[in-house]
Amino acid sequence: MLFSKNSHHEKFLAGHYTRQPGIRLQLLLLVIVAFFYFHPAAAAEELSSIGLNLMPWPVKDEISGGQFRLTENFYLGGEAKPGHRVFKAGARFMSRLFGRTGLLFEQDYLAAQEINDRTKFFYHFDQPGQLLPGEDESYRLEIYPEKIELTARTDLGLLRGFETLLQLLSSDQQGYFFPCLRIEDFPRFTWRGLLIDSSRHFMPVDVIKRNLLAMSAVKLNVLHWHLSDDQGFRVESKVFPRLHQLGSDGWYYSQEEIKDIIQLASELGIRIVPEFDLPGHSTSWFVAYPEYASAPGPYQIERKFGVLLPVFNPAQEKTYKFLDRFLKEMTALFPDPYFHLGGDEVDPKQWKENPEIQKFMKKNNIPDEPALQAYFNRRLLKILGKYQKKMVGWDEIYQPGLPQDVVIQSWRGQQALVEAVRKGYQCLLSNGYYIDLMGSAEKHYLNDPIPPDSPLTDQEKKLVLGGEATMWAELVSPETVDSRIWPRTAAIAERLWSPAEIRDVNEMYRRLKVINLRLEENGVNHLKNQPMMLRRLAQSEQIKSLEVLAAVSEPIKGYSRHSQGKLYSSLSPLTRFVDACYSESFEARDFKRLVENFIRSRDLRQAKIIETWLELWQVNHQKLVSAESSPAIKEIIPLSEMLRTVSQAGLEALHLIMNGKQADQSWLQAKYKVLEEARKPVAECQLAILPDIELLLGSLKK
């Protein structure tokens, strides 16, 4: 949405132009007003942001007209008693409603929620829901001018309905209201997850809790908790205490903390599936117990990242006795029926170089190392079965002979999922949902566990349980992890909940901006940490020019930060400008839409808005250089200069278009060279507006 009241645009523009002569600010405001006045579609889009900002989008909605006006005598009531998760959900609902509106509700919603003659919001469910795949999460929400009714078959459905109602809260000059409508809703996929890696960088309890609350707000229902890797073993073990004592640097979760987190997740209708990665990614295990490794120690906690050599020894019986005792303890701690054992990226070098392992393979007719891993998996599967758990693993675990009651999580591609499903396995998709790669919300949104051109039959499609966003933690810290998860994971949540045909990208972004702000009430720091980080870098409160630059800068994509000259480790500070930048620039996307509309229409009123933005970016460099006093800022001076240069190129192109002039070919070639140079990363950042400037230049070719 262009110039949304909820975007960062106005904050930056107001901060910039209030320091300029008053006439400039007046001109800017007139330009913006004129844009919406002369463009009814844009105005309608702006007005629609007051209405349905739902994410995920429901299966069926019918707007009936009218409003339920919200006042301080708003009472909710149902059959839930204090202590029940629906009662707690109702209390959270009222608390968040109070936080948004400032209304002093008369009801003591922490003590009683029974139905009486004052009740305006009625909720009802038929039975408690079980935290299991396939459980009913459907609900029906009906809003009338005089009352609201939320009904569901299970209490899990009520939890999802509470979130929808909160998203419907709207306002006008008279106050707050809910639009009258009827919604019938249920999820497309039963497994809608987020993986949080607490191993490579430890994520304290408060990080996990606030992200659980944010997950609930967008109807995600599985936290996949990655708890062991080469860089750390993060769970207290009372059976093998040296695991956490020696393998964690002191950063681990006590079993009481884990129980507390599981309790909160249960109250939110979220399952927690733990992952202990085996047989590779296992260095931290061997710091305490090197006798279970395939090569002699000693071992120490790994600080580097990547696919490393240490791997469990699958040829010795004591390995399975050790893992049996460990899994007995952990399966009792984590109540979910599913248990993830990793299985990815096993380097077979130690297996090949260990004579005893090679002898074992020959004796047992195991032809190669992948078959040896399959043997290992079958042994672990038998152990998990003894403790009534179902095994989940990454797609490398699939080998001929693997029982079909294993769930395979595909990270290497859609084809791996298709092949596993066709062999009768239940599957999850994570390929395309790797949010640590800094991809756009659009890219993740259009990625589908069952795409429109899926070759699967209707019966085979039933084996696709859903998918998971994956937040691997090589380059995130507790300070930055929220900004890497949100808001893009909300787009993934919609893909996993909403009907497949809900695919309008521009409409998704319109709603995502609103949801992005509302997620803050759950405690996530994805927005508020950026200015704090910039103040720390600048050693000053004067960070406006840094904010302008950060708004149109993004971290470089994929895993390319690891190849930019800095040797990252688990001890590296993640406090630089690149870490403060958001994963995706909404400003650049909005600017691109504005440029596209202008190129199509040649409307000079749109050109004036484009000009205003380009001028802001063009003059920002001098402001940043003048204010710069911190050594930590020096590395981004070339990036700021680059923004000035490409904005100047954009201004020149815009003026040529506005004046109906042709571009000189030598001039055009020079500007394309400017863009080519600007594509080179600076301080591991890239300017997100480069494609937008290229659009302006490209239009001069015609």
Image (cartoon, grey):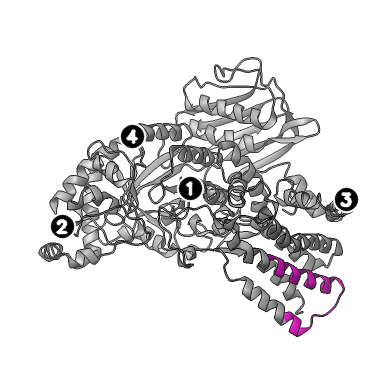
- Specify start and end residues of the magenta stretch as a single range: 643-668
Q: Residues within 10 Å of mark 2 (few under 14, many from 20)?
A: many
At 82% across and 64% down in the image, what residue appears? 607
Residue 398, image x, y percentages = 31, 59
Q: Residues within 10 Å of mark 1 (few under 14, many from 20)?
A: some
The label number, if any, that marks residue 255 in the structure image: 4
At 21% across and 55% down in the image, what residue appears? 298
The label number, if any, that marks residue 22 in the structure image: 3
Q: Earlier in the sequence, mark 3 or mark 1?
A: 3
Inspect the image, locate mark 1, and give the three-letter code of the amino acid beneath it. Phe
Inspect the image, locate mark 4, and give the three-letter code of the amino acid beneath it. Gln
Q: Which residue is mark 2?
A: 315
Q: CA distance from mark 2 to mark 1?
A: 39 Å
Inspect the image, locate mark 3, and give the three-letter code of the amino acid beneath it. Gly
The label number, if any, that marks residue 189 in the structure image: 1
Q: CA distance from mark 3 to mark 4?
A: 61 Å
